[in-house]
Amino acid sequence: MAIYLTQESKVLVQGMTGAEGMKHTRRMLAAGTTVVGGVNPRKAGRTVDLDDHAVPVFGSVHEGMDATGADVSVVFVPPASARAAVTEAADAGIGLAVVITEGIPVHDAVAFTAHARARGTRVIGPNCPGLISPGQSNAGIIPADITKPGRIGLVSKSGTLTYQLMHELRDTGFSTCVGIGGDPVVGTTHIDCLTAFEDDPDTEIVVLIGEIGGDAEERAAAYVRDHVTKPVVAYIAGFTAPEGRTMGHAGAIVSGSSGTAQAKKEALEAAGVRVGSTPTETARLVLAALEGGA
């Protein structure tokens, strides 16, 4: 099985006719994703030829859903348009909105994540690589050729670390990999994904990738301790980050003793999570747990 995204998912791409949207729509199609249309009110009614696929362009998410039965939207619009795009998707009743766009103002992210939640729409992101259920569907910018279907579930703040762990564990494979994004406000959390992976019969172990800043990993540790029966292995990025300086993601900033990698590592280990010191060691811990060594 998989979480959030399966081979039955039908995907609309908001911003498909832009350069990034076009490039990654091609990659999604090549990975076997059922992309049923793009959304651009200025180009509605056209058809875009993407390799062997003729993809229609709709004037709105609602129109695209009515015509195709789409249940997922991938958002590639510029930061200034992201709030309106996600709000439109939620108002249309889309089940999942995957927001790739980075640089979205925090107040806009707060507004559209709250609006989407009230409408029953799950948001992945913003500022994320999306998610992939290998062999089934790929919604976003994750390379589809670095892994295969398997037994590992992965949830990560970092896009590049998502790719690295996928590559490190490529011979074992993944049920679903979810890049939740590293902004201060995200629509789907580590805990949301842990809950879904715990309920997924085809996921045997979960990899959790976190980073400095905030308390999401500490809250995830408490949730693992109380609610997760499957083994969890973690990696925390940012042990050498200087205090008070944002590192990479907008949410990756340490203030005093709050949000440090060491504090997160200690909280996770206290909850029974094995924490690797490097991505490669983390992969070894995962393999050992699958072989019964954890």
Image (cartoon, helix red, strand yellow):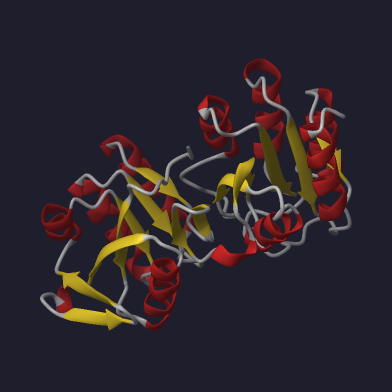
Left or right placement of residue 91 versus residue 161 in this view: left
Left or right placement of residue 205 versus residue 108 in this view: right
- Answer whether residue 288 is visible to the viewer in this image: yes
Q: Please tell me how many numbered marks the rendered image carries.
A: 0
Front-most of residues 137 and 77: 137
Q: In percent of the image, x 41 and y 69: which residue is there? A: 79
Q: Residue 217 location in percent, x, y? A: 69, 37
Q: Residue 126 location in percent, x, y? A: 48, 56
> Up-down: is 64 above or below 290?
below
Q: In percent of the image, x 33 and y 47: which residue is there? A: 8
Q: Residue 228 location in percent, x, y? A: 64, 22
Q: In percent of the image, x 79 and y 30: which residue is there? A: 273
Left or right placement of residue 244 versus residue 24 in this view: right
**Quadrant holding the C terminus:** top right
Residue at the extreme top of the image, as rendered: 226
Q: In percent of the image, x 73 and y 28: which residue is there? A: 231
> Up-down: is 156 above or below 232?
below
- Answer whether residue 258 is visible to the viewer in this image: no
> Up-down: is 260 above or below 288?
below
Task: Classify residue 250 by image quadrant.
Answer: bottom right
Task: Classify residue 204 by image quadrant.
Answer: top right
Task: Classify residue 183 by image quadrant.
Answer: bottom right
Front-most of residues 38 and 169: 169
